[in-house]
Amino acid sequence: GESVGLHLPTLSVQEGDNSIINCAYSNSASDYFIWYKQESGKGPQFIIDIRSNMDKRQGQRVTVLLNKTVKHLSLQIAATQPGDSAVYFCAENPIQGAQKLVFGQGTRLTINP
Amino acid sequence: DGGITQSPKYLFRKEGQNVTLSCEQNLNHDAMYWYRQDPGQGLRLIYYSQIVNDFQKGDIAEGYSVSREKKESFPLTVTSAQKNPTAFYLCASSYYRVNQPQHFGDGTRLSIL
């Protein structure tokens, strides 16, 4: 398949373990954050979002944590499965009321059997 | 099924040629976006459009042009002025409301012959 990033940070986890992917964002005024999953040769797929008035949000097998004090966002994936192998991007919306997302570089998650 | 369709999946351009990438959505989204993705980098915004017949430059608009004559369609032309056009191009759409996630197509990979 096509590579979307040749020099991405990589996280390797054992199948069944929990994964934690971290993201440092740049703008303290950002009010909305999104995590995307991108598989090889495909477009990013929406996973979960969180607004700045929250510090935690849960979805199916995923949890996003937001720490505005240190401008840090994390994505936790419970019981990681082979299908979770992908590149994960965080995105922030630094201009309130606008729709212009700023994307991080991405983290490649690989699952060891 | 609702979604975003990008075509073609692979496109080849000769030096000096303009090429147009297609993006169509049937999600009834107001806003549409074009991003460029290079290996080792996150997505960078080329152009975006919040309503029909209106669009704005993103961070890397030089060498590109767009039109938005219909709500469903937002074609991107890569002109001969774009000196490094080889990349993965992604189209996205969203509702034009505060803090709405963007949803992506599966991209067009453009290469220079």
Image: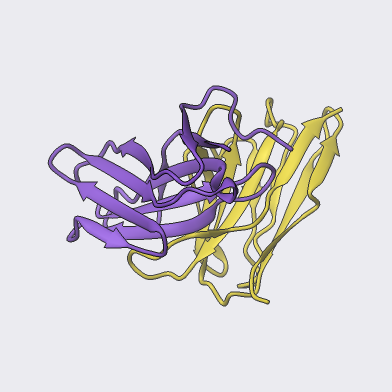
Chain colours: A purple, B yellow
What's the residue at 19%, 42% (across, down)? A28
Q: Is residue A76 left or right of residue B56?
A: left
What's the residue at 67%, 53% (across, down)? B106
> Residue A78: x and y, percent?
40, 52
What's the residue at 59%, 50% (across, down)? A83
A100 or A28, which lies in front? A28
> Residue A18: x and y, percent?
39, 45
From the image, which quarter does the N terminus of chain B lie in?
A: bottom right
> Residue B15: x and y, percent?
83, 27
Q: Is residue B51 left or right of residue B65?
A: left
Q: Is residue A76 left or right of residue B52?
A: left
> Residue A55: x and y, percent?
19, 55
Residue furthest out toward the top: A7
B28 or A113, which lies in front? A113
> Is A25 situated above or below A100?
above
What's the residue at 42%, 69% (across, down)? B96
Residue A30 can be seen in this image? no
